[in-house]
Amino acid sequence: MIENFKKGSEFIVYLCGILLFSSVLLISTEVFLRKFFLVSFGGVDEISGYILGISISWSLAYVLFEKMHIRVDILYTKASKIVKSSLDSIAMFFTLLFSIFLTYFTGNVFLTSLEKNSLANTPLATPLWIPQSVWFLGFLFFSFLTLIMFIKAIKALIENRIDKDVSVKKEF
């Protein structure tokens, strides 16, 4: 099950990369057209902002799977299995709290925009619930996977302690 989520998050990261690259091309084209032909698409900055927010929210799950978040490995690499499992559990707990916090507030923003039928104050007048729904779903996906990883970390912590208890009993 976890492998499927990992592959799914990897696929989503590739899609986000394509979106970001497309955004860069769109911005570059906009700058070029404005500079030399005094023509503007209009709304490129708005679209790029949506792409950036959506890409960040959906790529967090991949970062979690690949352990690319900020960590201090100096002591971690020299620690025993139980200490590593304990540190992993603590880290996943706080990551879970953070992800729930993000999901809660992005959900509130999305629901408020949906209820009030809010439009962006830009020439495109984008209904804000559209990009915010994708943004919210990215954080929801991240929270769900963080919960699974937290449960997995707790399970590893319990199994390491059981293994240690078994090895102590065998010595007696």
Image (cartoon, rainbow, N blue to C red):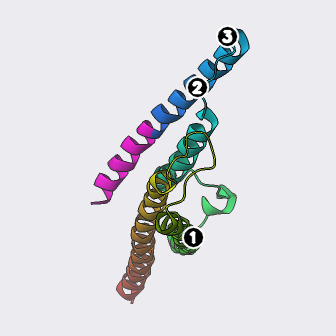
Badge 1: few (under 14), some or many (20 or more) residues near its Cα, within 10 Å? few
Across and down, in percent, residue 65 comes to 45, 54
Residue 152: give x, y in percent of width and height.
Answer: 39, 70
How many angstroms separate mark 1 from mark 3 (CA)?
42 Å
Which quarter shows the N terminus? bottom left
Distance from label 1 to label 2 (Cα)?
32 Å
Q: Earlier in the sequence, mark 1 or mark 3?
A: 3
Label 3, label 2: how many angstroms apart (C-alpha)?
A: 12 Å
Q: Which of 60 and 103 is in front in this view?
A: 103
* Nearer to us: label 1 or label 3: 3
- Give the main secondary structure of the magenta stretch: helix
Q: Which residues are drawn in magenta?
A: 1-15
Which numbered disc covers residue 105? 1
Identify which residue is drawn at 69% across, 18% down: 34
Q: In this view, does 171 lie above or below 69?
A: below
Dot 1 amino acid type: Phe
SS class of the residue under badge 2? Answer: loop
* Secondary structure of the residue carrying numbered label 1: helix
* Residue 49 in picture, x, y percent from top left: 60, 43
| Number of numbered tags placed on the structure image | 3
Between 163 and 101, the one lying in front of the other is 101
Mark 2 sits on what residue? 41
The residue labelled by disc 3 is 37
**Badge 3 element:** helix
Left or right relative to 37: residue 2: left
Going by the numbered disc 3, the residue's amino acid type is Phe
Q: Which amino acid does label 2 sit on?
A: Phe
Q: Residue furthest top?
A: 36
- Residue 11 visible here: yes
Quarter of the image with the C terminus in it:
bottom left
Q: Does the magenta stretch include residue 16?
A: no
